[in-house]
Image (spheres, rainbow, N blue to C red):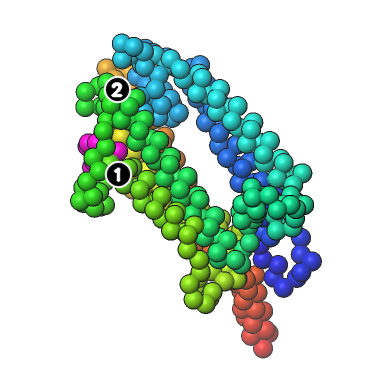
């Protein structure tokens, strides 16, 4: 957070970033607590949708988002292959339990543990190997070797998550809209296929290609993670490489950029692709319109003359797009602030222009 040259500047409680700017312990606490909020929202919404699900109405026309995702990955089907919601309640409750665990960890890092992990010497006071290893994860904003070490582990965890999903599809199976049933989907790890789908991935119609992309991404992330863990800063640590720039606000800006672009890509994919987003669970594909800004509308407003509400596809697409748009604006705002730009200089400049105009009028 900027202090605008005032070392004693304080922010209100609503400015959450000010709590974690130079306090890595609080940064971890907010990170974990945020994960708990996401987990709670997913679990609670899943149970809410399951409670109001009407089997007589197509799922895609009931305004649901959590249950369609579960159906897409092959969850909620009975032994006959019909979606009944079996096991969905367990998934919702499990998410709620996990959210409480995350909340507890967030409170520990926010209330009990040190505000800054660099000052938590009491936690790593002895020379036991496990404590020496844990000390390597202490956030040090101006230590590039520390930052790349932590980044590497994040990449490996993301890669393992991709492997988990690929193995789930290969062994349990996911829903294939082409046959209207859950089937086991082996991955097509063809590098040329992945390369060729860089710019036409919205039209992918093969689940094998989808899982092959996840398998390639897993390999890429794990190799990248190992590289970041094993390597250290090469050459002089300049501002271009992050010197005096790395901070909680800088990381926030990059995170907002990543999630913003992913949300926009997901919006376009959800609007038109029926392989990853089957019509059985999300409704028919959408039509892109332009007004003040782009938006998507349903192409099937009624069935047999009976009006329908917005499809799950319409909700997901439009919400993803506009959230992504505002996330990217937040990225630009926080990135410029992290670089040290003083936004008050704009207000001062405008004020000076007004004063100049007033003085000119008097003269």
| Residue at mark 1 to residue at mark 2: CA–CA distance | 20 Å
In the structure shown, which secondary structural element does the residue marked by tag 1 occupy?
helix
Label 1 sits on residue: 213
Residue 285 seen from this side? no
Label 2 sits on residue: 182
Residue 278 image-quadrant placement = top left
Give the residue at the far right of this rendering: 8
Compare residues 260 and 87 and report the one nearer the observer: 87
x and y percentages locating residue 8 in the rendered image? 79, 66
Q: Kindly identify the residue that appears in the image at 56 percent across and 22 percent down.
A: 93
Residue 346 image-quadrant placement = bottom right
Is the residue marked by circle 1 packed among few (<14), some (14-19), or many (20+) residues within 10 Å? many
Q: In the image, is 167 to the left or to the right of 11?
A: left
Q: Kindly identify the residue that appears in the image at 45 percent across and 28 percent down.
A: 66
Span highlighted in magenta in the image: 203-211
Q: In the image, is 53 to the left or to the right of 82?
A: right
> In which quadrant is the C terminus drawn?
bottom right
Compare residues 24 and 263 and report the one nearer the observer: 24
Q: In the image, is 247 to the left or to the right of 69?
A: right
Is the residue marked by circle 2 packed among few (<14), some (14-19), or many (20+) residues within 10 Å? many
Q: Kindly identify the residue that appears in the image at 70 percent across and 45 percent down.
A: 109
């Amino acid at each position: 957070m900027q202090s605008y040259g005032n070392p004693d500047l304080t922010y209100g409680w609503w400015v959450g970033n000010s709590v974690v700017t130079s306090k890595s312990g609080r940064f971890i606490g907010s990170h974990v607590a945020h994960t708990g909020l996401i987990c709670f929202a997913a679990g609670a919404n899943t149970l809410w949708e399951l409670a109001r699900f009407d089997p007589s109405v197509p799922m895609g026309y009931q305004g649901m988002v959590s249950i369609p995702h579960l159906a897409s990955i092959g969850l909620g089907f009975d032994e006959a292959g019909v979606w009944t919601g079996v096991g969905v309640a367990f998934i919702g409750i499990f998410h709620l339990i996990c959210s409480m665990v995350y909340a507890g960890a967030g409170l520990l890092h926010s209330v009990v543990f040190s505000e800054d992990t660099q000052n938590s010497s009491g936690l790593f006071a002895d020379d036991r190997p496990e404590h020496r290893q844990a000390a390597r994860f202490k956030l040090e904003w101006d230590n590039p070797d520390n930052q790349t070490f932590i980044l590497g582990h994040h990449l490996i965890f993301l890669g393992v998550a991709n492997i988990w999903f690929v193995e789930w599809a290969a062994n349990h199976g996911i829903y294939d809209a082409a046959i209207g049933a859950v089937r086991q989907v082996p991955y097509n790890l063809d590098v040329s296929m992945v390369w060729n789908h860089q710019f036409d991935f919205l039209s992918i119609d093969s689940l094998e290609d989808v899982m092959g992309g996840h398998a390639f991404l897993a390999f890429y992330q794990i190799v990248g993670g190992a590289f970041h863990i094993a390597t250290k800063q090469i050459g002089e640590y300049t501002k271009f490489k992050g010197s005096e720039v790395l901070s909680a606000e800088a990381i926030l800006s990059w995170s907002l950029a990543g999630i913003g672009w992913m949300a926009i890509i997901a919006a376009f994919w959800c609007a038109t692709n029926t392989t990853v987003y089957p019509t059985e669970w999300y409704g028919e594909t959408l039509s892109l319109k332009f007004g003040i800004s782009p938006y998507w509308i349903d192409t099937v407003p009624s069935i047999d003359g009976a009006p329908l509400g917005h499809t799950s596809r319409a909700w997901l697409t439009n919400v993803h797009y506009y959230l992504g748009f505002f996330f990217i604006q937040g990225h630009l705002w926080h990135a410029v602030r992290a670089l040290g730009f003083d936004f008050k200089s704009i207000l001062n400049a405008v004020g000076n222009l007004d004063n100049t105009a007033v003085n000119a009028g008097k003269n």
